[in-house]
Image (spheres, coloured by chain):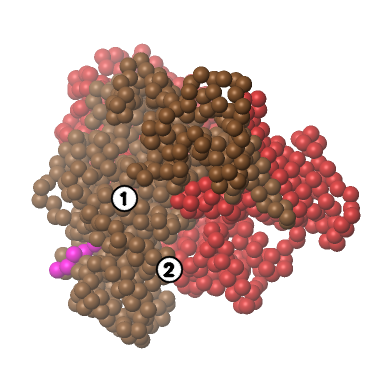
Chain colours: A red, B brown
Amino acid sequence: MSGGGPGGLQPTAEQPRVEVYDTTLRDGSQQVGLDLTVADKLRVAAALDALGVDVVEGGWPGSNPKDAEFFARASELEWKNARLAAFGATRLPRRGVDDDANLAALLAAGTPIVTLVGKAWTLHVDEALRTTRDENLAMVADSVAYMAAAGRRVVFDAEHFFDGYRADRGYALAVLDAAVEAGADTLALCDTNGGTLPDDAARVVAQVASSRAVRVGVHFHNDSGCAVANSVMAVSGGALHVQGAANGYGERCGNADLFAIIAGLELKRGHELLPPGRLAQLASTARTIAEFANLPLAPRQPYVGSSAFTTKAGLHASAIARRPDAYAHIDPGAVGNQQRVLVSELAGRSNVLAKAEELGLELSPELAAEVLDQVKDAEHRGYAYEAADASFELLVRKMAGALPEWFSLDSYRVMIERSAAEDRSEAIVRLRLGGERVVAVGEGVGPVHALDQALRRALAGFYPALSGIHLVDYKVRILDGRAATSAVTRVMLTSADSVGEWTTVGVSDDIVTASWEALAEGVGYGLLRAGAEPPPASPAPDTPCHLETIGENA
Amino acid sequence: MSGGGPGGLQPTAEQPRVEVYDTTLRDGSQQVGLDLTVADKLRVAAALDALGVDVVEGGWPGSNPKDAEFFARASELEWKNARLAAFGATRLPRRGVDDDANLAALLAAGTPIVTLVGKAWTLHVDEALRTTRDENLAMVADSVAYMAAAGRRVVFDAEHFFDGYRADRGYALAVLDAAVEAGADTLALCDTNGGTLPDDAARVVAQVASSRAVRVGVHFHNDSGCAVANSVMAVSGGALHVQGAANGYGERCGNADLFAIIAGLELKRGHELLPPGRLAQLASTARTIAEFANLPLAPRQPYVGSSAFTTKAGLHASAIARRPDAYAHIDPGAVGNQQRVLVSELAGRSNVLAKAEELGLELSPELAAEVLDQVKDAEHRGYAYEAADASFELLVRKMAGALPEWFSLDSYRVMIERSAAEDRSEAIVRLRLGGERVVAVGEGVGPVHALDQALRRALAGFYPALSGIHLVDYKVRILDGRAATSAVTRVMLTSADSVGEWTTVGVSDDIVTASWEALAEGVGYGLLRAGAEPPPASPAPDTPCHLETIGENA
């Protein structure tokens, strides 16, 4: 239902071409905690190129050696869709363009596009630049003309344009006109402080675009929570170039999220921004770039987040199965995402059946009812299956008799010691694997880490697949904090193999027991995925015991 | 510069009053991973009331026992600003209102406001409700009239209104008119699937509002990344009631972030939504509710996030100091947040001095700088003093030499055993109290409870005041979940005596050590409050050791 769905208007074939300009590697990288190496930047650029954006702004070559290196190496890559832009400031006040190191570095980057930023707000000309307003106009004109003469396509970034337009409209427009007359090809109106609201965005862009022959674009920040909306509204107002960053990265509240802009304009306004078929790569591109950035992708991120099409409202499940378009603003597949129905205590039997079917298990209505009872009972005690898909699957498989017993616990003991002399956690686990008994000890940072180490050591000899399974996330929630340290504790544990991730849950009034449950299920589910062979089922009570020591598999 | 700042328009005194309707406890709670107990819900409601929202929607009393319990307990609270709303559906098809269990539960909730949701999209009437369109109109009219006759103020939530308006405008408006004629006081136009873009939002609201005499409101979801913008635009279009959730909580991509809407309308459109002076509590309210929800507050959340006014662009620092209004869309103080320049320490030291003065301690500027260094270092390692007031005070007192040493730890040992035969946690702590040594053992539910029991037993003979101090809340947060079970763990522990509560923090890569820190500080701060006499300072290494056994003080 892309475009024509309930949330969209019919696409009109007549929409003008809007240029997509990505600034993840320059402005997006200003985000606190986002720190890309040159190799990371090249990978992000390649992912954006594969998605099909028009322009990748690679950095500010005059500002740091890392960006200069990026441009040197980027020119060796094979670009399929995108052209590279280098970013820099206009020349210094009362200096020439020929001896400006920043402009020289911009030229040296060798990009087809040069983006020059200049001041458009009198406050900044007077107080930050501390030069005359005429000199600022000359700086813009000289710098643009210099780059145009060198054969570059020039995008002029009018910094603080919306604030400048509000403060002194005539001067803000004079800055734009100086850039146009000097040969700028595109004007990007920047909402540098992010304070603009959508109606102002649309109105100002329409006023600028209607009276100028060049391409007018926009660059929004999300300080008012309106960056995506402002961008979409600006395009309605006549903008033909839109800047943003992958996943909305950027300093303060971030840049406009380029992915939400692309999806909104393509699916709801009939624009064609990416090459045909590429929109379905949006979610995987978002995840890939988040991996390169080493930042978790927000589950609720519009269009591409893991929860973006997930509902836990039980009453909707059967209805969703019947008419998915009635409950989602777009077809999730259009952006490469998927609809997920979660199981929770509010859910009905149809949710359980739908989920089981998703897992490839056929349940009788009676068994589904039993599973639902179990789920409700467990959730009442604090389990949360909606986020612990693997534990839910293990529960269903177990009740359906379709789960091998990889191992069972005889006992464990954990010791924690703290003194001036030492600080130590140690765990001993005793397991049964079919007919075999195994004892192993693990040391760790804290009791849960020690248990994890001991469990892995106990199983390593039997299940080589375990070496490819590791823990990636661990969450603890005290369910009724008011019962203080004896309250019920829920542990959510995420494990991963080379193919994907899964989450398991454990609940107990003791955090160690809750963690053990989640650990044991996480390993069990991993072995299921790996297709590991379960141990021989017949128990032989007197078999000798395997002892796995700390040194052995470390 | 609130309102008149560079990002805002001058406030106009003539803006009509817009009602703020919070749905955190109902629609917001549909968020995956958000699971509030009844006690949590009451605390969230109190925080929203203190902020000054007009309406707090407490839940759906007909859907689950938890919400029914909430309403029973909420009526005992003293509400200062907010009125309570209970949410529910219109009557069932082809049934009367008198034998409708859902409507009965709504009445039983005893709230002044009842919010009734009904279908406004023909697709849902035909396919989900599976009744006739006339019957749907009758369901709306009957249910609204029933609640109005019972003396309730009725808000009518028109589900899927924007989709319905697009699909069959006449029918969508007929649904609204049925509600109005039956006595609904407010129409909330819901963008249930979240697909609407801002220009459509403004246009549709203006068309509805201009031709109806009742209050028209809106309820947006963020699936297109436009929920805040849509809400602001809807108000420009004539909406006088706006629904949203704290921090944008909600299923899929979330509900409209109520806090960003409030800040935008107050600071940039001159509306007065909260009682005078309350906007400056916005950031602390957002953090408090995030704590109750046990969800981290997104650093980049507009207006209230910790990074919302933080720049890492070094070149701006001195300029920001000179003209803060040139680099921020609003005055951060207007929403109770602060500008942070990552390289500057100036703002912090004055905070430390102010806090010390609050505690009745005079610090030299040098000592304040040292405290600030300690705080920064500790926060870098994961401590969070903002929510742990007691730990901050202990730190300042310790550095000022104004803290008695109630006890010091020699060592502890914790043992956890689990087997078919038994399930046991046991702790032994060895303390030094001035010249005395004491050893005590405690048993508990899990290691932390056992440690708490042992600590209390060790101190009970020396500090009788301890019997009046108890733990009331315990929270665990894994700070870098990606390091899994060896990640840094932060424990926040709240203790109470007969007069009040205080919170302490502990951080370690081991949950037991982190808990011990918070436990020991919680007890120490309680003894300070109780004015307990510290032990004689002179250590006497050969004094006999007091042994406190499990039986003795149990």
Query: Which element is circle 2 on?
Result: helix
Foreground of the two, B273 or A414: A414
Q: Residues within 10 Å of mark 2 (few under 14, many from 20)?
A: few
Query: Taking A216 as reference, is A505 left or right?
Result: right
Amino acid bearing label 1: Ala
Mark closer to the chain start, 2 or 1? 1
Q: Is residue B299 left or right of residue B337?
A: right
Chain on which label 2 sits = B
What residue did someone put label 1 on? B47
Query: Which quadrant of the figure has residue B325?
Result: top left
**What is the x, y in percent for residue A131?**
22, 18
Which one is nearer the viewer's eye here, B70 or B459? B459
Using the image as rendered, state which of residue B333 and residue B524 is in the foreground. B524
Find numbered disc 1 in the image and state the secondary structure of the residue it sits on.
helix
- At horizontal 75% and vertical 59% (from top left) the residue drawn is A405
Q: In this view of the protein, which residue sits in the foreground, B356 or B477?
A: B356
Write the start and end of the magenta stretch as one range.
B213-220
Could you classify mark 1 by the number of other residues whose Cα lies within 10 Å: few (under 14), some (14-19), or many (20 or more)? some
In the rendered image, residue B434 lying in the magenta stretch gets the answer no
Total numbered labels placed on residues in the image: 2
Most distant residue in the left direction: B14
Amino acid type assigned to the residue bearing label 2 in the image: Pro
Residue A20 visible in this rendered orientation of the protein? no
Q: Which residue is mark 2?
A: B65
Which image quarter holds the C terminus of chain A? top right
Whole-number angstrom distance, CA of label 2 to CA of label 1 = 23 Å
